[in-house]
Image: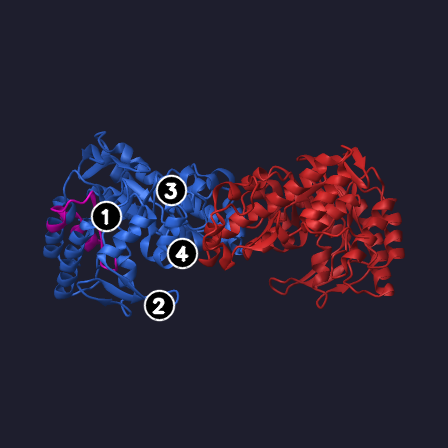
Chain colours: A blue, B red
Amino acid sequence: MNFELLAEEGGARRGRLRTAHGVVDTPAFMPVGTQATVKALTPQEVHELGAQVLLANTYHLALRPGAERIARLGGLHRFMGWDGAILTDSGGFQVFSLDHLVKVSDDGAIFRSHLDGSEQRFTPESVMAIQRELGSDIAMAFDQPVSWPATGATARAAMERTHQWAARCLTAEAAPGQLRFGIVQGGFDEELRRESAEVLGQLAFDGFGVGGLSLGEPKTVTYRLLSLQTAILPRERPRYLMGVGTPADLVEAIARGIDMFDCVLPTRIARNGSILTRGGRINLRNRQFIEDAGPPDEGCDCYTCQRFSRAYLRHLFIAGEILGHRLASIHNLRMLVRLVGEIRQAIGGGALAATITSLREQWALAPLP
Amino acid sequence: MNFELLAEEGGARRGRLRTAHGVVDTPAFMPVGTQATVKALTPQEVHELGAQVLLANTYHLALRPGAERIARLGGLHRFMGWDGAILTDSGGFQVFSLDHLVKVSDDGAIFRSHLDGSEQRFTPESVMAIQRELGSDIAMAFDQPVSWPATGATARAAMERTHQWAARCLTAEAAPGQLRFGIVQGGFDEELRRESAEVLGQLAFDGFGVGGLSLGEPKTVTYRLLSLQTAILPRERPRYLMGVGTPADLVEAIARGIDMFDCVLPTRIARNGSILTRGGRINLRNRQFIEDAGPPDEGCDCYTCQRFSRAYLRHLFIAGEILGHRLASIHNLRMLVRLVGEIRQAIGGGALAATITSLREQWALAPLP
């Protein structure tokens, strides 16, 4: 088995996922490197902030610079200079976010490139072939998410298609050592979500993504549907909650049995001057920080917080200097990697509930149903 | 003396400048950190590429975030997290580049901020006070450059004012350990350039900037005027050619007795995908590099060239990713720091002429008059 469960406490799990590019200690937060770069950071910086795995995107890389090209250049790891693990998203989410342009059939999806309007076709088989060429460590199955609030019939049709596509993905050849994760869907309906976890859980995937959540529905709905599915998915395989990653979400989802996360939030908000701190989210462009000599986040061990003041970061953002985006990205990613690491260490120690309660208080979260 | 001449060969000099923040081996190339950041780089990266001194800008920092504010935050070194030497330009060049808005008198210059249109006043005394507050290691005197082609009368008036201002700068209090450099001017007239070097050379500056060159005049004029002035300026004090920094310029100016350089070129062209290589300048956005697996510059020891391909950098630029700008900046700065270091090591070894000839060939330069 590639995944080893080391401890369980409450609903939370501590584990170890073996990939062709190293071990991933779970729960794990994966920085997002959509276009083969974690925005504004070098691979060395991503490594130094403690990440063992990052996410890249099949849709974006297939369109530019092209998967065959990356293969000829030695594969994605070599191309982007990252020797840790890489999970590639299947592109399902991206394709169906362009829903005004996409034509879906049981065969696959035909859509127009957001870059040049050219017609493109993704099928379960082609998406797995792209991921084989990229040489990622974890390939995601091609899926069809639905947006909130989708009706029952729409959600069912998309779910059933996702299930058929999942089976086809498993018949495709993988890269050497490449793991394959299925994606459960089911819209916002409890029955469908249960059914999807049951059907997918029967298939020979190495792990499972929980897709189609946090698309606009209330958080209580997100967490209820999530709990339903993690209760059904095979215990001995890893679960990855796709695209979700506020500090509050991480805490709640780990408590509900999630092992892996990705989210663009930390790098996206960094671009505008926002940082995540133990006291909540702050925007460093705010005038109140103009002469604040303190570190961006007291007690943080990242390069940014060890070396620079809030006043300096504010200056960089106001002056439009790229270094501001860089330094805030380093901090925000380190913050989430460290938060997840803290919970990971607590799992199995017998005091996880206290850790969760303390984190909920820190992040001003009420316990959720 | 703060400056020690270690060797001379032909017109070139090898030396050592002692500052309050470490030794600067000369000839030296100074990366430009106009707004208290070398664009897109951390201080650690600037250090790793071998720079011992960087340049920051009085004009920009006085307007934003303000010199008094930086002083309250512990001075410029602490503010920007750089513990090497800092030279601050006086702002003369910036103020007089806004010439449609500036009113000059013997007292100083009144101009409008490019940020908010507010009226500002710089005098020799105020500019030295700003640099004292910033706590730079080398403060430049306030000067009035003229643009090409300036008439004799305009150039003389600006030169004479520059000389009067220089004397006033010397009466102002410096920060502890702060060195002060005068700036020679004289437009594009040989007699004025000689006179300026003679007058300034009499004053008790720790070194001299050669200002007002490379402003549009032919290169032959630049180098002739430069040679005239370095022949007159006191041998035992360092000379800094301001704002000049193509590889060709560095080679030619060192051969004419220049010890220090700054230029925005390496970081500015990096933003658009251009890099300096031993084979000349190339733009990595060019389609010819789309599958080029080789390093950006064969034989370069920088982080970028050690780790990434031309194809990857091209992808980053085409995809609009900040990492491209970063990686190209690291390479371009390392390239110039290394080029200057190579010449420095050759000075005094008896074979400098051969080194210069070989570099001229490498950079496809004809010897200049």
- Whether residue A28 sits left or right of residue B182 in the image: it is left
Q: CA distance from mark 3 to mark 2?
A: 40 Å
- Tell us which disc is closer to us: 3 or 2: 2
Residue under label 4, please give it: A65
Q: Earlier in the sequence, mark 2 or mark 1?
A: 2
The stretch of residues the image draws in magenta is: A199-228
Residue at the (63%, 37%) spot, across then down = B84
- Give the chain letter at badge 2: A
SS category of the residue bearing label 4? loop
Task: Answer whether residue A215 is magenta in the image.
Answer: yes
Residue under label 3, please give it: A335
Neighbours of disc 2 within 10 Å: few (<14), some (14-19), many (20+)? few
Q: Amino acid at mark 4?
A: Pro
Residue at the (83%, 49%) spot, across then down = B227
- Tell us which disc is closer to us: 4 or 3: 4
Residue under label 2, please give it: A118
Q: CA distance from mark 4 to mark 1?
A: 22 Å
Q: Say which of B328 and B61 sits in front.
A: B328
Q: Earlier in the sequence, mark 4 or mark 1?
A: 4
- Give the chain letter at badge 3: A
User: Is residue A245 at all visible to an observer of this figure?
Assistant: no
Disc number at residue A173?
1
Q: Amino acid at mark 2?
A: Ser
Check whether the beta carbons of the residues at disc 4 and disc 3 lie within 8 A of each other: no
Residue at the (13%, 61%) spot, across then down = A156
Labels 4 and 3 within one chain: yes
- Tell us which disc is closer to us: 4 or 1: 1
